[in-house]
């Protein structure tokens, strides 16, 4: 069982007020708050241990390098990866997927080749593939969900054709909360020789992830949603794809030798980490993942499942509230609209007056919004520090929004 009071005490921001009310932070899907351990690690790194990495032979550079490199092992442990050389540190999922698009997909795809996407993807897992569509005629093939927001893994596998070169799919929808059975998708894709990229930005926050078990080729995570610093993140790349992938960016650190007429690359993962990295961001990410593993991913998942069930029960009593995404095993992410309440921005403004932070908008999921026929929703997304009492506040604020706007 999770000791939520103890966890909350670790997050300084949770004790502040917003608009004269205690903060109820339910915008974790956009970005999560940071525990004291992460804030202290970032401060300490800048105050006492800062230097560039991999370059100097002086004490501070060695400390910074050691701390930065240790994060690779922490990410590997967090994701169930045995060989930490398969972990490339970066600024987040957007960079990770762009690296795959430019470094792996672009050189091996021709006009008419296909990439399969689910209709639930975040723009970070859509726009880089649109670049390939625009620039070299790659075809984007979309697989839809059912009315509850469930994605049938067999439908994804059945979409594979002779020209399919990649499946790029989310592990957990940032709008609907739907969990995707990426293990089955990877098994089917592997039989047909098609690599799979999994966008783990949301899933890794809410449930244990074991990449060995999933069997994907690429798995992207983003640090700021994992209670770590913004502009931190990582991507797992299998050894087979590492050997096929070209560097996306050129610069220091990713090369072994540079001469006037030739260069030789460094070995992976350095080959894919050009320039001075987000040293302190990475150190903070390592502390955040250690924090999550100390709390326990199973315990986090169980706590959030309980919050999901309580929220679901409370919301089902509100007949003027419409939810998007109703699969029973979804994550505690609730996208909703309120009858007659106008734009979700107005709803979120009223919720904010009650101290409740939610996101309103298209959630960077244009194709999903088109598919469900809405331009925007409000989204309440829970994290490990949220409580049942906060669900009461959320529902009271929703009732107020309905009274005022509905
Ligand atoms: N994928 C999903 C499912 C997301 O929810 C997000 C962030 O909202 C991203 C990708 C992009 O992450 P970042 O902006 O941190 O690169």
Image (cartoon, rainbow, N blue to C red):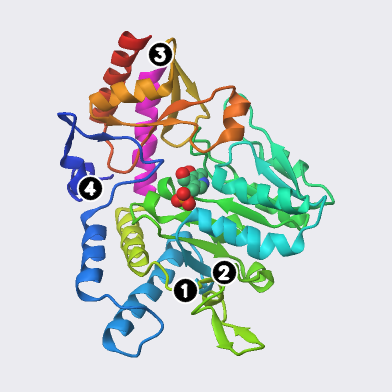
Residue found at the very far front of the displayed protein? 260
User: Given this view, does label 4 or label 3 mark the residue nearer the observer?
Assistant: 3
Mark number displayed over residue 341: 3
Q: Looking at the image, do the residues carrying marks 2 and 4 touch, with CB atoms under 8 Å apart?
A: no
Instruction: Report whether 196 appears left or right of 112.
Output: left
> Residue 309: within the magenta?
yes
Secondary structure under the numbered disc 3 in the rendered image: loop
Residue 30 in the image, given as x and y percentages of width and height = 40, 42
Between the residue at mark 1 and the residue at mark 2, the CA separation in whole angstroms equals: 9 Å
Instruction: Report whether 95 appears left or right of 156.
Output: left
Residue 59 in the image, given as x and y percentages of width and height = 27, 87
Q: Looking at the image, do the residues carrying marks 1 and 2 touch, with CB atoms under 8 Å apart?
A: yes
Residue 163 in the image, given as x and y percentages of width and height = 82, 52
Towards the viewer: 42 or 314: 42
Between the residue at mark 1 and the residue at mark 3, the CA separation in whole angstroms equals: 49 Å
Mark number displayed over residue 7: 4
């Amino acid at each position: 069982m999770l000791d939520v009071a103890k966890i909350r005490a670790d997050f300084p921001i949770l004790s502040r007020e917003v608009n004269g009310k205690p903060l109820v932070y339910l915008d974790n899907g956009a970005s999560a708050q940071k525990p004291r351990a992460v804030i202290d690690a970032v401060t300490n790194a800048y105050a006492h241990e800062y230097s560039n990495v991999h370059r100097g032979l002086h004490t501070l550079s060695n400390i910074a390098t050691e701390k930065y490199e240790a994060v690779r092992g922490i990410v590997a442990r967090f994701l169930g990866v045995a060989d930490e050389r398969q972990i490339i540190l970066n600024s987040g999922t957007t960079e990770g997927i762009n690296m795959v698009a430019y470094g792996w997909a672009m050189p091996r795809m021709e006009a008419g080749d296909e990439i399969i996407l689910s209709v639930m993807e975040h723009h970070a897992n859509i726009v880089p593939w649109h670049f390939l569509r625009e620039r070299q005629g790659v075809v984007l093939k979309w697989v839809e969900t059912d009315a509850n927001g469930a994605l049938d893994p067999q439908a994804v596998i059945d979409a594979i054709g002779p020209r399919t070169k990649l499946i790029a799919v989310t592990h957990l929808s940032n709008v609907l909360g739907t969990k995707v059975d990426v293990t089955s998708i990877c098994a089917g894709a592997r039989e047909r020789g098609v690599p799979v990229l999994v966008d783990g930005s949301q899933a890794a926050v809410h449930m244990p992830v074991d990449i060995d078990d999933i069997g994907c080729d690429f798995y992207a995570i983003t640090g700021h949603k994992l209670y770590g610093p913004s502009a931190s993140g990582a991507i797992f790349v299998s050894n087979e794809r590492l050997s096929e992938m070209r560097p996306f960016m050129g610069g220091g650190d990713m090369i072994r030798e540079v001469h006037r007429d030739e260069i030789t690359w460094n070995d992976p993962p350095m080959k894919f980490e050009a320039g001075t990295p987000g040293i302190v961001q990475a150190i903070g990410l390592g502390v955040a993942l250690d924090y999550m593993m100390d709390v326990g991913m199973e315990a986090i998942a169980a706590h959030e499942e309980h919050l999901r069930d309580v929220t679901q029960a409370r919301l089902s009593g509100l007949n003027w509230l419409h939810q998007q995404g109703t699969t029973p095993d979804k994550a505690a992410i609730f996208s909703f609209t309120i009858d007659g309440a106008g734009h979700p921005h107005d709803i979120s403004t009223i919720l904010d007056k009650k101290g409740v932070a939610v996101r309103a908008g298209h959630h960077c999921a244009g194709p999903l919004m088109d598919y469900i026929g809405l331009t925007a929703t409000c989204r309440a997304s829970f994290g490990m520090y949220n409580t049942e009492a906060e669900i009461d506040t959320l529902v009271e604020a929703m009732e107020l929004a309905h009274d005022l706007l509905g």
